[in-house]
Amino acid sequence: KEKGPQHKQQVEVQAAVKQLMNDEIQPFLKGLLASPTLGPSEAVKAQLEQMRQGLGDARRRAALCQALRQEILGRDSSQGPELDGAKAITVALAAFDGIVALFKSALDSCDEQNDAWCGRDLMVMTQLLRTDGGGVEKPVQLLSRVYNHALWNKVTFWEDALLLGLCEAHSAESVWRRKLPAGSQWSQPSMTAFLQRFVGYMMAFGISFDQGRNSVWATLRKHAPLLGGSSKAYATLLLQKYEEMTVPPTSPSGPGTPAPASATAGPAPRTLEQAETADPGNIPGDTPTDGGAGSEANGPGSDDAEGSSHQLMAEDSFEAVAFGLGTEFSQHLASDDQGNEAITSAERGEMQQVIDSQPSTSEVFD
């Protein structure tokens, strides 16, 4: 059967991205990461600036993401094709500044062009690249250098990133089904490593669990026609682990009882952009009002905010972020998840088995 014009265009774009990655970006990254402690040469700096300015082209951003993915996964041959389970790599401080510049420019373009696909990959990779500080500064994650970027404040970015993850899971399931006997049925929705960590990614950028939970529920309602009857099951799989981790201790306080960790330790918590509240009567399967696409965030400003790009934060701070930040509840999304979370303990137990039973993306596509 003859392919249509859209298929032809897609093939051409994929070929252009592959050529950019192989001929231009990947050799440059290898040279940059191999820079001596004295820093990259003037020629490398000039090439870095040229590449940074070209990241407004979506094809170059995609090529950059693919090259970075290969560089991270290529450090350990035992790793599969999923970034979410990859080991973090450490680069020299001299090369780290160049990587930061590339990430900031790429994130700016993702923000301007609503590119959630590349933005999602860049978001994951900010937690997989670090520097040891060259013996002068404290070890630092790339996340700390882009923590204040405006993209992380947008409800629409996190909604789109979650939708991409859900579509990936369904695509993996469709491929996996072809390997099973005819008539095989799946009793639970498909999960991937990205979906299992999704709420944790939000919390790593200072978004409180309450905001993340409301965002997840709003996205699942919005796309309920696509998900069918699995919205409630997905909510449990996405949220249950983090609900258990964020439950306050039940031990009584008294003399000698240690005080809980400060909820404001580490980077400032983030408040997602304002969005219209959904009807509390909605249940999974109803589509709520879309929430404020493109509006400005109320949280930390862009990455040019004072003290953002020039202040190194220790990695230990971001380990505390995951469960310590965000005591102020967001008022931008509906607080109607109480009825949606009326799931019995038996149902929760059944859902918990899914994480162990589902095949990973690497198993599907190997």
Image (tube, rainbow, N blue to C red):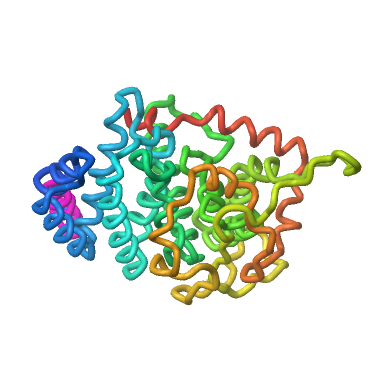
Whether residue 291 appears in magenta in the rendering, the answer is no
Pinpoint residue 288: horizontal percent, then vertical percent.
Answer: 59, 69
Q: In the picture, residue 136 is in which quadrant? A: top left
- Residue at x-position 47% and y-position 38%: 193
Q: In the picture, residue 6 is in which quadrant? A: bottom left
Magenta-drawn segment: 5-20
Residue nearest the viewer, comparing 4 with 268: 268
Pinpoint residue 143: horizontal percent, then vertical percent.
Answer: 43, 51
- Is 366 located above or below residue 273 in the figure? above
- Taking the image as drawn, is residue 15 in sight? no
Residue nearest the viewer, comparing 118 with 7: 118
Dominant secondary structure (helix, strand or loop) of the stretch shown in magenta: helix
- Residue at x-position 17% and y-position 51%: 17
Pinpoint residue 11: horizontal percent, then vertical percent.
Answer: 16, 51
- Is 181 located above or below residue 213 in the figure? above
Pinpoint residue 179: horizontal percent, then vertical percent.
Answer: 38, 27
Q: In the picture, residue 32 is in which quadrant? A: top left
- Taking the image as drawn, is residue 238 in sight? yes
The quarter in which the C terminus is drawn is top left
Question: Is 11 placed left or right of 284 in the picture?
Answer: left
Whether residue 13 appears in magenta in the rendering, the answer is yes
Question: Is 356 placed left or right of 243 in the picture?
Answer: left
